[in-house]
Image: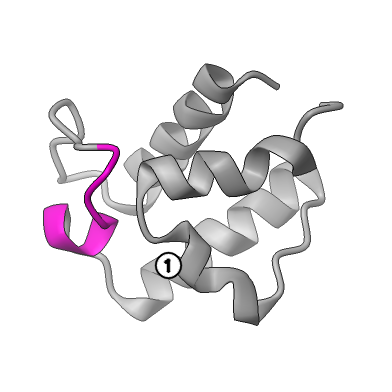
Amino acid sequence: MTPSEIRQEILEILEDIAPDEDLTNLDDEKPFREQIELDSMDFLDIVMELRKRHRIQIPEEDYPQLASMASTVKYLEPKMADL
């Protein structure tokens, strides 16, 4: 997957998890939690959805790398390159 495809995938997951949030002006460099209402369970839902959709395992120690859209795409790019 390309970075833009990964970004779109994350947006779709966020829309499912936080349907009331407006994601049109999401700043890729700012942490998700500064921009939208996400609690720790919502964050785990993102991780679980990635696992379910793409069989991607994300170790708990890597969770901080998923703080913003830019860091999430960068983290996932090598893991999703062959998808």
- Image point (28%, 75%), residue name: 39
- The local crowd at label 1, few if under 14, some if 14 to 19, many if 20 or more residues have their Cα within 10 Å, is some
Q: Position of residue 77 (x, y in %)?
A: 67, 36
Q: Position of residue 71 (x, y in %)?
A: 46, 49
- Does residue 49 lie above or below 54 as drawn? below
Q: How many marks?
A: 1
- Amino acid type, callout 1: Phe
- On screen, residue 15 versus residue 59, left or right, reads left
- Does residue 19 lie above or below 45 as drawn? above
Give yes or no for residue 25 being in the magenta stretch: no
The N terminus lies in quadrant = top right
Q: Position of residue 16 (x, y in %)?
A: 39, 44
Q: Which residue is mark 1?
A: 43
- Image point (60%, 53%), residue name: 49
Give yes or no for residue 30 being in the magenta stretch: yes
- On screen, residue 25 versus residue 16, left or right, reads left
- Does residue 28 lie above or below 8 as drawn? below
The C terminus lies in quadrant = top right
- Image point (50%, 19%), residue name: 4
Q: Name the residue furthest right.
A: 82
* Element under disc 1: helix
- On screen, residue 21 versus residue 28, left or right, reads left
Write down the region rendered in magenta.
Answer: 28-35
Q: Position of residue 2 (x, y in %)?
A: 64, 18
Along the viewing direction, whichever of 32 and 70 lies nearer the viewer: 70
